[in-house]
Image: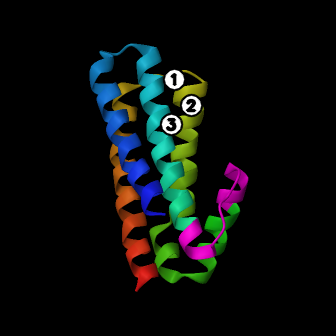
Amino acid sequence: MKARLGDAWSFLEAARKELLESRGDPVRVRDAAEKAWNAVVEATDALIYAFTGSRPMSHYERRVALREIERRFEGAKRLGLRDRYMARYKVLHGETFYEGVVDLGEVEVELEKVEEYLKDVELLLKGART
């Protein structure tokens, strides 16, 4: 669990570096978006494992697990992690990486949202261990 969260932060840092060095090159911006999306996936997997003891194998399984976690734990529900997961999925993974919609301002905003997501997952994980 700790390793996955560490990987999440590493992916986010790599995304920031890639975006900074991209100089607007569409391929590099798309790669930065996908790295940021991987940060969300790693953090989500760490959270799901901590709360359920299982590792999701697909995005569908992650959504279902997040829905269940929010149903069972008020703190997770208040943070709206499932909705936030889906928003990052749509913009970073779907629109930017796959569809090739390259909007530097949008990707910069998304990277900030990824950081907020990782911080909130860390807070929940600390609570899960106490």
Choose between 116 and 43: the one closer to the eye.
Answer: 43
- Cα distance, mark 2 to mark 1? 6 Å
In the rendered structure, which disc, 2 or 1, sits on the residue that comes first in sequence?
2
Residue contact at pointers 2 and 3, CB within 8 angstroms: yes
Residue 104 locus on image (x, y percent) = 36, 26
Q: Residue 101: x and y, percent?
A: 51, 23
Mark number, residue 92: 3
Instruction: Identify residue for label 1.
Output: 101
Asked whether the residues under the numbered discs 1 and 3 touch, taking CB atoms below 8 Å apart as contact, a structural biologist would say no
Q: Residue furthest bottom?
A: 130
Q: Residue at x 43, y 72 (%)?
A: 125
Q: CA distance from mark 1 to mark 3?
A: 9 Å
Q: Measuring from the top left, give residue 74's x and y in whole percent.
A: 51, 82
Question: Which amino acid does the dot numbered 3 rest on?
Answer: Leu
Mark 1 surroundings within 10 Å by alpha-carbon count, few (fewer than 14), some (14 through 19), many (20 or more): some
Q: Secondary structure at mark 3?
A: helix
Q: Which residue in the structure is indicated by mark 2? A: 95
Q: Is residue 80 magenta?
A: no
53 over 39 or under it: above or below:
below
Left or right: where does residue 21 sit relative to residue 64? left
Q: Where is 91 relative to 30, above or below? A: below
Q: Are marks 2 and 1 in contact (CB under 8 Å)?
A: yes
Q: Amino acid at mark 1?
A: Val
Compared across the picture, whether 45 is left or right of 110 comes to right
Q: Which residues are magenta?
A: 49-63
